[in-house]
Image (cartoon, rainbow, N blue to C red):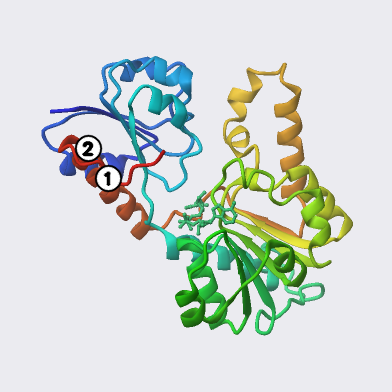
């Protein structure tokens, strides 16, 4: 019997997990890990979190019995892997649960912008049924640049081909077989930025991809292109994005993620940290971006389909059971 604490869980997930992990001592917390609640998990050998729990060295220190972290996400940049390696804590993620799910959401953002769905919605709420200013653009014949041709990126490429788009992919690894089957071309980052009408980000966030889209790379983008980010906020330098949207260099942006999204979600927490000007600046800047009518923002919701959520829980339970049987599954770091 293992002691397992789950953070960021909804009531229906609790019911599901209780059935799947019968016989273990389970604790559930609806909120992310915080300095206040972490001590409640001090006896846990395993914790399971989603992306809003910052599992840093300070948090890990407060969990002396911790042996495993099962993050219920693909990304694991909220976990201090170095500290985990030092403490021999095994970390597992959910590598494939939502590649089609996130790709479909990517197209929800693209189509909102290409056909002004967001503007139409707001207009009709005001009983205004005019179509002036709602002219969109076709996807057929346009070029989509996919930065990061992994699980999600390949589904985005496949869907783009169904719309009759040309697809360029930039990735440090190449899969020539898929390039032939899906019918896309690999490109250098510079060529992709230059040629694409829509650029969609699907790389993980790490030290190599941090601010990959910055002032300099934006200069190389075709004027009037649209940027879509469903990957991680910090892949884009948000100051540079704001400037590009204000100047018209970028015609629009579809964002499921943005730097500082954790601060926006936790504005109450921010109020207790009035002394930190950088945080306030990030929040004000994000709100400025959300108010632009050529920006569609969804609150890190791309993964959130019923089918994907069940796949996440099943894989996480499998990771935990694998760990308890001594067979690490979906290990990261
Ligand atoms: N918004 C959401 O709800 C949501 C949900 C799931 C995943 N994500 C994000 O999407 C990202 C991609 O997910 P995935 O399942 O496709 O991951 P993946 O690992 O299958 O694909 C990532 C691809 O990026 C490539 N890559 C890595 N570093 C690179 C670099 N420096 N330059 C160029 N290419 C590079 C890899 O070779 C790989 O092909 C995740 O890391 C996660 O951050 C977001």
**Where residue 130 appears, x then y in whole percent?**
77, 75
Count residues near mark 2 (Cα–Cα under 10 Å), then give few for <14, some for 14-19, many for 20+: many
Which image quarter: residue 2?
A: top left
> Left or right of 244: which side holds 255?
left
> Left or right of 240: which side holds 33?
left
Task: Report helix, strand or loop for mark 1.
Answer: loop
> Left or right of 55: which side holds 135?
right
Count residues near mark 1 (Cα–Cα under 10 Å), then give few for <14, some for 14-19, many for 20+: many
For image coordinates 47% across by 45% down, the residue present is: 75
**Picture layout, residue 283 above or below residue 310:** above
**Nearest the eye: 153 or 310:** 153
Q: For marks 1 and 2, give the CA distance.
A: 7 Å
Indicate if the residue with disc 1 has its beta carbon within 8 Å of ligand 1. Answer: no
The earlier-in-sequence mark between 1 and 2 is 2
Q: From the image, which quarter does the N terminus lie in?
A: top left
- Residue at the right extreme of this rendering: 247
**Nearest the eye: 75 or 14:** 75
**Picture layout, residue 203 above or below residue 28:** below
**Where residue 261 appears, x then y in whole percent?**
61, 39
**Where residue 201 appears, x then y in whole percent?**
61, 58
For image coordinates 63% across by 24% down, the residue present is: 270
Labels 1 and 2 touching (C-beta < 8 A): yes
Q: Which residue is mark 1?
A: 329
For image coordinates 31% across by 55% down, the residue present is: 311
Q: Which residue is mark 2?
A: 323
Please say whether residue 124 is visible from this viewpoint: no
**Nearest the eye: 213 or 267:** 213
Which image quarter: residue 192?
A: bottom right
């Amino acid at each position: 019997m293992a002691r397992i604490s789950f953070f960021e869980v909804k009531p229906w997930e609790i019911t599901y997990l209780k059935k799947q992990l019968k016989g273990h001592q389970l604790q559930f917390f609806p909120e992310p890990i915080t300095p206040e609640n972490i001590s409640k998990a001090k006896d846990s050998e395993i914790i399971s979190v989603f992306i809003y729990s910052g599992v840093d060295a300070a948090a890990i220190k407060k969990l002396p019995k911790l042996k495993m972290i099962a993050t219920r996400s693909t990304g694991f940049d909220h976990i201090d892997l170095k500290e985990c390696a030092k403490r021999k804590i095994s970390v597992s993620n959910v590598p494939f649960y939502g590649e089609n799910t996130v790709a479909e959401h990517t197209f929800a953002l693209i189509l909102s912008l290409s056909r002004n769905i967001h503007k139409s919605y707001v207009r009709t709420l005001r009983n205004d049924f005019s179509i002036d200013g709602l002219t969109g653009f076709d996807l057929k014949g346009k070029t989509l640049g996919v930065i990061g041709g992994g699980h999600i990126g390949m589904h985005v490429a496949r869907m783009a081909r169904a719309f009759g788009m040309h697809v360029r992919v930039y990735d440090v690894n190449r899969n020539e077989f898929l390039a032939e089957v899906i019918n896309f071309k690999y490109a250098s980052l510079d060529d992709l930025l230059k040629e694409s009408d829509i650029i969609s980000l699907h790389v993980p966030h790490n030290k190599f991809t941090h601010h990959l889209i910055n002032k300099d790379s934006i200069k190389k983008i075709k004027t009037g292109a649209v940027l879509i980010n469903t990957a991680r906020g910090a892949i884009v330098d948000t100051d540079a994005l704001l400037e590009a949207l204000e100047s018209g260099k970028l015609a629009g942006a579809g964002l499921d993620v943005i730097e500082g999204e954790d601060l926006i979600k936790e504005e109450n927490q921010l109020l207790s940290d009035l002394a930190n000007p950088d945080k306030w600046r990030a929040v004000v800047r994000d709100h400025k971006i959300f108010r632009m009518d050529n920006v569609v923002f969804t609150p890190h919701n791309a993964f959130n389909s019923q089918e994907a959520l069940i796949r996440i829980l099943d894989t996480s339970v499998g990771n935990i059971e694998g760990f308890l049987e001594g067979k690490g599954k979906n290990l990261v770091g």
